[in-house]
């Protein structure tokens, strides 16, 4: 009974309560082995801020694996391989082993990949489905399947899984924040804010929740509220590149161009792959009169994400302001190729025609 009650508490996010139940298991050797296995896995899959955290102690799992007794030893061996980053070894150790727990571990192995690599998201989704259909409703299994579905573009599936995780574990901060993101994508601003208020009520210093709420507030015109959220996010997580990048956007909107550039410099130092930060720093540099610096940033953004419309349009305008008609025409032409029906497409065509006319005129004069 204590084994089952511990599993239920674990599924609900009460790791401490689950561990207490398992420590008090008495009875035969098989029950004791199961309790040890669950305690070892609880330490490995520690819930942090409502989500799966970094690996913890695995001594209990290693001991069980060495003893080699029962199905628990096989699962423990697979978990030690997983802790070492050996996804293939984990799957081999659990291959064809029935039950929700092996499926859960196979799903996690496929999600994280070898040594943190890309893994096999489609197979992970299937394994989580097996685990959830055969076992108790683990909130973080729903959450992780929701993440994978979201990343694969299955927004309805992601929303369904995050909602299921929240039904099981109402204070699941990461699930609430991710559901808010999907609700915002669907233009459900009120629903997104409701989720964020709930998440931040549980953890007022959660940087992801603060950044997302700041974004909603900024777009709604509440710049003071957005600034409070972003200052709190940076205060809670000084090395959070997204928080710094978002605050850089806000500071530019408020006219603090040097402050914007400082934040975006810091964001790019932490995450040079953040394409939007290159583009946004280019905007702030252009506003400050550093046209060459702005062009350099927009070109870097486009190297990282060809077809980024804001960077293409701004790069064309900057090149045109310098009399670089050919470079400007190339930017406008690419904008129209990528997004011929964009609301700015008409203006881009006018500018392209103007540049091509100037190029033609210069050609006539040079003959």
Image (cartoon, rainbow, N blue to C red):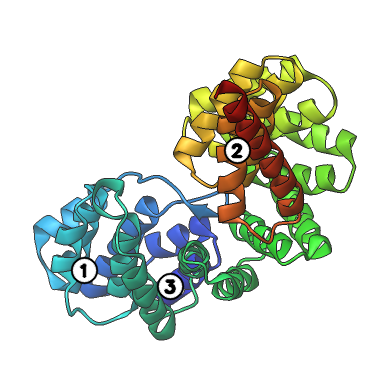
**What residue lies at 53% left-to-right and 65% top-to-bottom?**
150
**Residue 26 seen by the camera:** no
Estimate the x, y position of residue 141 in percent, counting from the top left: 46, 68
Dot 2, crowdedness within 10 Å: few (<14), some or many (≥20)?
many
Q: Is residue 36 above or below residue 8?
A: above
Estimate the x, y position of residue 298 in percent, counting from the top left: 57, 31
Marks 1/3: CA–CA distance: 17 Å
**What residue lies at 56% left-to-right and 54% top-to-bottom?**
337
Q: Is residue 257 above or below residue 36?
A: above
Q: Is residue 170 above or below residue 357?
A: below
Left or right side of 56 for 360: right
> Looking at the rendered structure, which numbered label has been put on residue 329?
2
Between 297 and 44, the one lying in front of the other is: 297
Secondary element type, mark 1: helix
Count of residue discs: 3
Mark 2–mark 1 CB contact (< 8 Å): no
Between 362 and 260, the one lying in front of the other is: 362
Secondary element type, mark 2: helix
Residue to which mark 3 is pinned? 2
Dot 3, crowdedness within 10 Å: few (<14), some or many (≥20)?
some
Mark 1–mark 3 CB contact (< 8 Å): no
Marks 2/3: CA–CA distance: 72 Å
**What residue lies at 36% left-to-right and 81% top-to-bottom?**
130
Residue to which mark 1 is pinned? 72
Left or right side of 33 for 312: right
């Amino acid at each position: 009974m204590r084994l089952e009650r511990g599993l239920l508490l674990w599924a609900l996010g009460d790791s401490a309560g689950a561990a207490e139940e398992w420590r008090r298991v008495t009875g035969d050797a098989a029950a004791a082995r199961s309790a040890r296995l669950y305690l070892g896995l609880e330490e490995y899959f520690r819930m942090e801020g409502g989500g799966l955290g970094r690996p913890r102690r695995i001594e209990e799992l290693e001991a069980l694996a060495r003893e080699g007794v029962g199905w628990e030893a096989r699962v423990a061996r697979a978990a030690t391989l997983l802790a070492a980053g050996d996804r293939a070894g984990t799957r081999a150790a659990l291959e064809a082993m029935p039950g929700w727990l092996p499926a859960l571990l196979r799903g996690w192995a496929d999600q994280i990949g070898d040594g943190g690599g890309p893994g096999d998201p489609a197979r992970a989704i299937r394994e989580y489905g097996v685990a959830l259909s055969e076992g108790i409703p683990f909130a973080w299994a729903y959450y992780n399947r929701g993440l994978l579905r979201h990343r694969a573009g299955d927004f309805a599936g992601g929303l369904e899984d995050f909602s299921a995780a929240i039904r099981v574990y109402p204070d699941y901060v990461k699930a609430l924040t991710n559901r808010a993101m999907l609700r915002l994508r669907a233009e459900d601003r009120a629903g997104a804010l409701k989720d964020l208020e709930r998440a931040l009520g549980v953890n007022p210093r959660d940087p992801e929740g603060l950044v997302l709420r700041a974004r909603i507030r900024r777009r709604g015109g509440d710049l003071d509220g957005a600034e409070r959220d972003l200052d709190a996010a940076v205060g809670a997580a000084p090395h959070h590149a997204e928080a710094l990048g978002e605050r850089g956007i806000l500071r530019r909107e408020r006219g603090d161009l040097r402050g914007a550039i400082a934040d975006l410099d810091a964001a790019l130092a932490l995450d040079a792959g953040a394409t939007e930060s290159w583009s946004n720093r280019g905007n702030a540099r252009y506003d400050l009169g550093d046209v060459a610096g702005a062009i350099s940033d927009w070109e870097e953004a486009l190297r990282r994400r060809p077809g980024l419309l804001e960077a293409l349009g701004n790069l064309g305008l900057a090149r045109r302001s310098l009399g670089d008609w050919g470079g400007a025409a190339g930017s406008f032409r690419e904008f129209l190729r990528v997004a011929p029906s964009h609301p700015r497409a008409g203006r881009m065509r006018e500018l392209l025609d103007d540049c091509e006319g100037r190029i033609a005129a210069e050609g006539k004069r040079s003959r």
